[in-house]
Image (cartoon, rainbow, N blue to C red):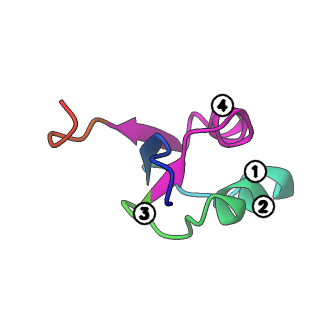
């Protein structure tokens, strides 16, 4: 009974050094804490908002498997 939920892969490309605390907390909330670390997250409005908030520090990776 597992639902197939759409996911996105987010990769950290920027350092949180010298960034405001709320941006650091957003990265931690996304599960990112090191450069080039990737996380697979459920594609929801909440996650998209967090990604938009730190868009200069992360990128959404296009998976070859889904293409």
Region of the chain picked out in magenta, as a range? 40-61
- Residue at which label 1 appears: 23
In-front residue for pair 47/7:
7
Contact check, label 2 and label 3, Cβ < 8 Å: no
Q: Is residue 19 left or right of residue 21?
A: left
Gap between marks 1 and 4 measured at Cα: 11 Å
Contact check, label 2 and label 1, Cβ < 8 Å: yes
Q: Is residue 50 left or right of residue 62?
A: right
Q: Position of residue 22 (x, y in %)?
A: 84, 53
Q: Secondary structure at mark 4?
A: helix
Gap between marks 2 and 3 measured at Cα: 15 Å
* N-term-proximal mark, 1 vs 4: 1
Gap between marks 3 and 4 measured at Cα: 18 Å
Contact check, label 1 and label 4, Cβ < 8 Å: no
Gap between marks 4 and 2 measured at Cα: 14 Å
Q: Secondary structure at mark 2?
A: helix
Residue 43: say if magenta.
yes
* N-term-proximal mark, 4 vs 2: 2
In-front residue for pair 11/62:
62
Bin the neighbour count of mark 2 within 10 Å (Cα to Cα): few under 14, some 14-19, many 20 and up.
Answer: some
Q: Secondary structure at mark 3?
A: loop
Pick the quarter of the image with the C terminus: top left
- Residue at which label 4 appears: 52
Q: Who's the residue at 58% across and 34% down the image?
A: 55
Q: Who's the residue at 55% across and 64% down the image?
A: 32
Q: Is residue 40 left or right of residue 17?
A: left
Which picture quadrant has residue 53?
A: top right
- Residue at which label 3 appears: 35
């Amino acid at each position: 009974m597992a639902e197939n939920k759409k996911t996105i892969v987010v990769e950290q490309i920027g350092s949180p050094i010298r960034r405001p605390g709320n941006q650091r907390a957003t990265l931690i909330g996304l599960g990112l804490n090191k450069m080039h670390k990737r996380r697979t997250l459920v594609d929801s409005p909440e996650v998209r908002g967090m990604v938009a908030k730190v868009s200069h520090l992360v990128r959404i990776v296009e998976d070859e498997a889904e293409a």
